[in-house]
Image (cartoon, coloured by chain):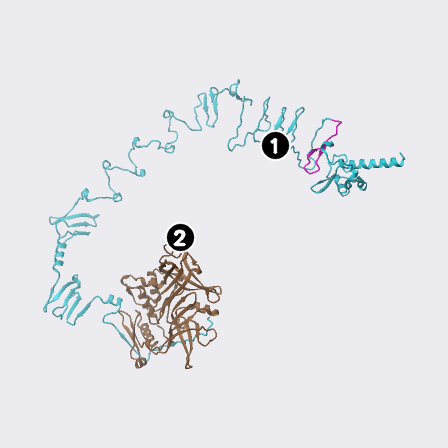
Chain colours: A cyan, B brown
């Protein structure tokens, strides 16, 4: 509601009373368009109060000289009142035009023959209850069989032909619906080459004498009397001859002297290239089958040699850079063969203890054994660092370096402990046995340089870094003993 | 147009209906808006509402021949446009119409003046075809609806038609607007295109249900609007005391209110109203011969500025043809006058400096009858 005060406009109903004068009048001439439309049937117009124009069907009475009458039932024919009678004042040209029109031929379209009228030569009658048969009025009567010459029809739609027969000698057809050919014989010359499909030929109706040349395509050739036959089940049988240059024999494909595949499973091959085609998964062999090679190599490009069974080699097995050998089972290289790995050899077991390396007949040596295992989880094998001064610098006495003072080792607790049950292999000699040793975390806190670490912190102590300190302490002990002895 | 910032005055937007959506022209481009709706006097016919908008065309985008314009190729006759004023986040449509012509000034300060016309202009151009025979005995609302159909006016929410008086059959063949005016006469009602573009037919009773939108006062009344122009008429010029209802072929009905005739002589007016029923025609004649039979001074025009209306902005922006306003005036000889008025038409002239508004008004009268 608006904010301003609202005006109260109380209605006062208008009531018809003595204050009003009300009248109803039917107008002589309606003053509206609709009124005129209703009253135009009869119009009388005064002209200067003297001459009148009448517009009606019957001759007006009481007319004065000069009045005009439009006879509405005679095409509004005009009459002039001469003081005594109505005389036609129709334009002579109109009468002439009417006479001309009357002289023209008429066309009748009705069910019965026109009668009782005035007919002239050439009038036409379409008999509507006789399929519009055309009659022509000639010599005083209606004549039938009016023919239309060719020139009378410039174009006729084929849709108008629905019955009867058309003589084929006068028809040239450019497009005919085959469904409308239902009788008679079709000349073979009228059949286009390569247009009959097998679906149009009944089964077992073509004999071999109809086949002279060309290619026969099918899965069954059921003759069986020659040296080559294909059975109804698809078995090809041939005992002689060649296929693609391979000699056929009863037990092999190919000549025993050259390349062949025999029924005993032997295959004589000089050179075999197995190529991977698009979508192929390669070459697979059934379980128990072997590839026996007496000399020669198996060379693989970027593929993998993978097998759940053993791969046995008597020669050299080489995996070039970028390749890998993956085996879910064991890999055995029989003596005296050699395993050469150009990259990383990984032994990854599925649990803590089943990744093992066996070297049972490894040679013994009096030289320092320099191989060390990394303390990290990766389990790498490293050479121990060398001791030659060729590889060292900043060489000083150990006791001269404060942070490496071996006397701090005197504080290192010497512990006894057992390894947790799941740490050592159950077959290990010290499994669950109390053994002496150090604790890596204590080594780290007292003599950190001798502690080794993994991602979780101190993991082991390094005997190669602990021993020099111990020797330095022993040397000091010897010196003190010598002094005490007075030596 | 800095005054139209939602504080001094409502913000303004000119929107074109393109690609099935209303899209606003940049308000920075609007130099002037002129709107005229309704009629200047109650006893004249409603005129088509027009609007003229002057755009700054330095950018060239309001030139209808500029195919690079963002509005191309829509700036052509028939383009729908509406003018909206927004106050306190509420948008009010104050004009809706169709582009009729454009005038391009390609001078050193290029401008484009677009001229718009509302739906009444389109209806006036349409003709009801001649029928082969008299047809359609129907209510005023139905007949107006049929005329709108001939004019191609959309249906649904674009129409609000009320009028139950039954009209005679017709052969038509006249302007749709003439036919509509017959229907309006028959119900003593009002037909207009609303400010939001709705073809509206209201009956006689509508004048008793319209709100009083504004109070104009020269005395600083609460919730009033200051005005600076007031044109009054003694009312004797609009006296009608004899009404003739012209029903075409049917009997015309004439009613004369004799007390008025005694004072002012016969002042007759003919109403082209093809009412079917004689009683209804008689009631219409009685009403029309009485409602203006007793003259009273009234205000026929109120001029004011629409700046700084504050909380009255919604009432101002809602003002529609047929709504009521009131004007208070204390004369120099200390007479207190009040005019209660009906809005017959309105003119807005919006420039950067001011929003000038003129309301054309007629006096409220209390007379009623059931037709």
Element under disc 1: loop
Left or right placement of residue A412 versus residue B88 in this view? right
Frontmost residue, B266 versus B54: B54
Around disc 1, counting alpha carbons within 10 Å, would you say few (fewer than 14), some (14 to 19), or many (20 or more)?
some
Frontmost residue, A34 versus A171: A34
Left or right placement of residue B146 versus residue A480 in this view? left
Q: Which residue is mark 1?
A: A324
Please state the chain letter of the residue tagged with numbered disc 2 in the rendered image: B
Residue A316 is marked as none
* Residue A433 is at least partly visible in this image: no
Left or right placement of residue A25 versus residue A92 in this view? right
Magenta residues span A364-387
Q: Residue furthest front?
A: B108
Q: Position of residue B148 (x, y in %)?
A: 34, 62
Q: Residue furthest top?
A: A257
Frontmost residue, A206 versus B34: B34
Q: Position of residue A80 (x, y in %)?
A: 12, 66
Q: Is residue A155 magenta?
A: no
Q: Which residue is mark 2?
A: B68
Separation of residues labelled 1 and 2 (CA atoms): 67 Å
Element under disc 2: loop
Frontmost residue, A358 versus B361: B361
Q: Is residue A385 magenta?
A: yes
């Amino acid at each position: 509601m608006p904010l301003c005060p609202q005006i109260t406009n109380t209605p006062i109903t208008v009531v018809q009373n003595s204050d009003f004068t009300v009248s109803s009048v039917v107008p002589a001439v309606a003053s509206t368009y609709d009124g005129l439309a209703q009253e135009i049937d009869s119009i009388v117009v005064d002209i200067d109060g003297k001459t009148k124009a009448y517009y009606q069907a019957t001759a007006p009475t009481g007319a004065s000289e000069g009045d005009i009458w439009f006879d509405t039932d005679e095409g509004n024919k005009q009459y002039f009142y001469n003081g005594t009678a109505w005389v036609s004042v129709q334009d002579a040209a109109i009468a002439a035009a009417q006479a001309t029109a009357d002289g023209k031929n008429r066309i009748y379209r009705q069910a019965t023959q026109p009668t009782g009228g005035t007919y002239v030569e050439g009038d036409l009658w379409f008999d509507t209850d006789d399929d519009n048969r055309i009659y022509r009025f000639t010599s005083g009567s209606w004549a039938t069989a009016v023919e239309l010459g060719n020139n009378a029809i410039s174009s006729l739609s084929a849709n108008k032909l629905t019955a009867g027969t058309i003589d084929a000698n006068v028809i040239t057809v450019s497009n005919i619906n085959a469904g409308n050919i239902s009788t008679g014989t079709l000349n073979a010359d009228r059949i286009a080459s390569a247009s009959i499909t097998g679906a149009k030929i009944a089964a077992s109706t073509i004999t071999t004498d109809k086949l002279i040349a060309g290619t026969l395509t099918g899965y069954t050739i059921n003759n069986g009397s020659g040296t080559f036959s294909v059975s109804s089940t698809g078995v090809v049988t041939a005992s002689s001859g060649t296929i693609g240059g391979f000699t056929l024999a009863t037990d092999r494909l190919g000549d025993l002297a050259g390349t062949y595949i025999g029924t005993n499973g032997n295959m004589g091959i000089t050179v075999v290239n197995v190529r991977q085609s698009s979508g192929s998964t390669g070459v697979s062999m059934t379980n128990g089958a072997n590839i026996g090679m007496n000399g020669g190599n198996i060379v693989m490009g970027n593929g993998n040699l993978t097998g759940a069974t053993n791969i046995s080699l008597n020669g050299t097995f080489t995996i070039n850079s970028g390749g890998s050998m993956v085996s879910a089972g064991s890999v055995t290289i029989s003596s005296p063969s050699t395993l050469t790995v150009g990259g990383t050899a990984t032994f990854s077991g599925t649990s803590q203890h089943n990744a093992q390396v066996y070297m049972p007949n490894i040679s013994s040596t009096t030289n320092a054994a320099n191989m060390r295992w990394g303390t990290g989880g990766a389990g790498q094998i490293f050479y121990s660092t060398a001791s030659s001064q060729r590889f060292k610098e900043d060489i000083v006495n150990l006791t001269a370096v404060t942070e490496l003072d071996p006397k701090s080792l005197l504080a290192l607790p010497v512990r006894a402990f057992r390894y947790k049950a799941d740490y050592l292999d159950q077959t290990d000699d010290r499994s669950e046995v109390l053994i002496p040793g150090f604790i890596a975390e204590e080594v780290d806190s007292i003599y950190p340089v001798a502690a080794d670490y993994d991602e979780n912190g101190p993991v082991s102590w390094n005997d190669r870094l602990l021993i020099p300190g111990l020797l330095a302490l022993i040397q000091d002990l010897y010196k003190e003993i010598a002094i005490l002895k007075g030596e | 147009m800095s005054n139209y910032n939602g504080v001094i005055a409502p913000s303004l937007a000119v929107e074109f209906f393109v690609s099935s959506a209303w899209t606003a022209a940049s308000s920075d481009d609007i130099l002037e808006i002129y709107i005229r709706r309704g009629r200047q006097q109650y006893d004249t016919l409603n005129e088509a509402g027009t609007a003229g908008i002057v755009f700054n065309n330095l950018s060239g985008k309001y030139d209808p021949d500029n195919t690079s314009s963002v509005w191309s190729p829509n700036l052509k006759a028939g383009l729908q446009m509406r003018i909206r004023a927004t106050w306190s986040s509420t948008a009010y449509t104050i004009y809706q119409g169709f582009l009729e012509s454009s005038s391009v000034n390609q001078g050193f300060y290029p401008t484009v003046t677009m001229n718009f016309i509302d739906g009444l202009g389109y209806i006036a151009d349409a003709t009801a075809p001649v029928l082969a025979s008299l047809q359609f005995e129907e209510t005023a609302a139905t007949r107006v609806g049929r005329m709108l159909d001939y004019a191609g006016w959309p249906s649904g929410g674009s129409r609000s038609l009320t009028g139950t008086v039954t009209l005679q059959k017709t052969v038509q063949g006249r302007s749709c607007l003439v036919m509509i005016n017959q229907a309006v006469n028959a119900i003593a009602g009002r037909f207009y295109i609303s400010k939001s573009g709705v073809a509206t037919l209201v009956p006689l009773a509508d004048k008793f249900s319209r709100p009083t939108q504004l109070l104009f006062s020269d005395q600083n009344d609460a919730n009033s609007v200051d005005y600076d122009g007031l044109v009054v008429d003694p009312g004797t010029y609009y006296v009608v005391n004899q009404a003739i209802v012209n029903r075409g072929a049917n009997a015309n009905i004439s009613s004369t209110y004799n007390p008025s005739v005694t004072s002012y002589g016969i002042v007759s007016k003919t109403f082209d109203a093809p009412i079917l029923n004689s009683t209804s025609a008689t009631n219409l004649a009685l009403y029309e011969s009485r409602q203006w039979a007793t003259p009273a001074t009234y205000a026929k025009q109120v001029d004011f500025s629409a700046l700084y209306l504050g909380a009255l902005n919604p009432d101002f922006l809602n003002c529609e043809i047929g709504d009521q306003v009131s004007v208070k005036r204390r004369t120099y000889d200390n007479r207190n006058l009040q005019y209660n008025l009906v809005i017959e038409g309105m003119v807005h002239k919006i420039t950067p400096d001011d929003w000038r508004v003129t309301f054309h008004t007629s006096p409220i009268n209390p007379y009623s009858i059931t037709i």
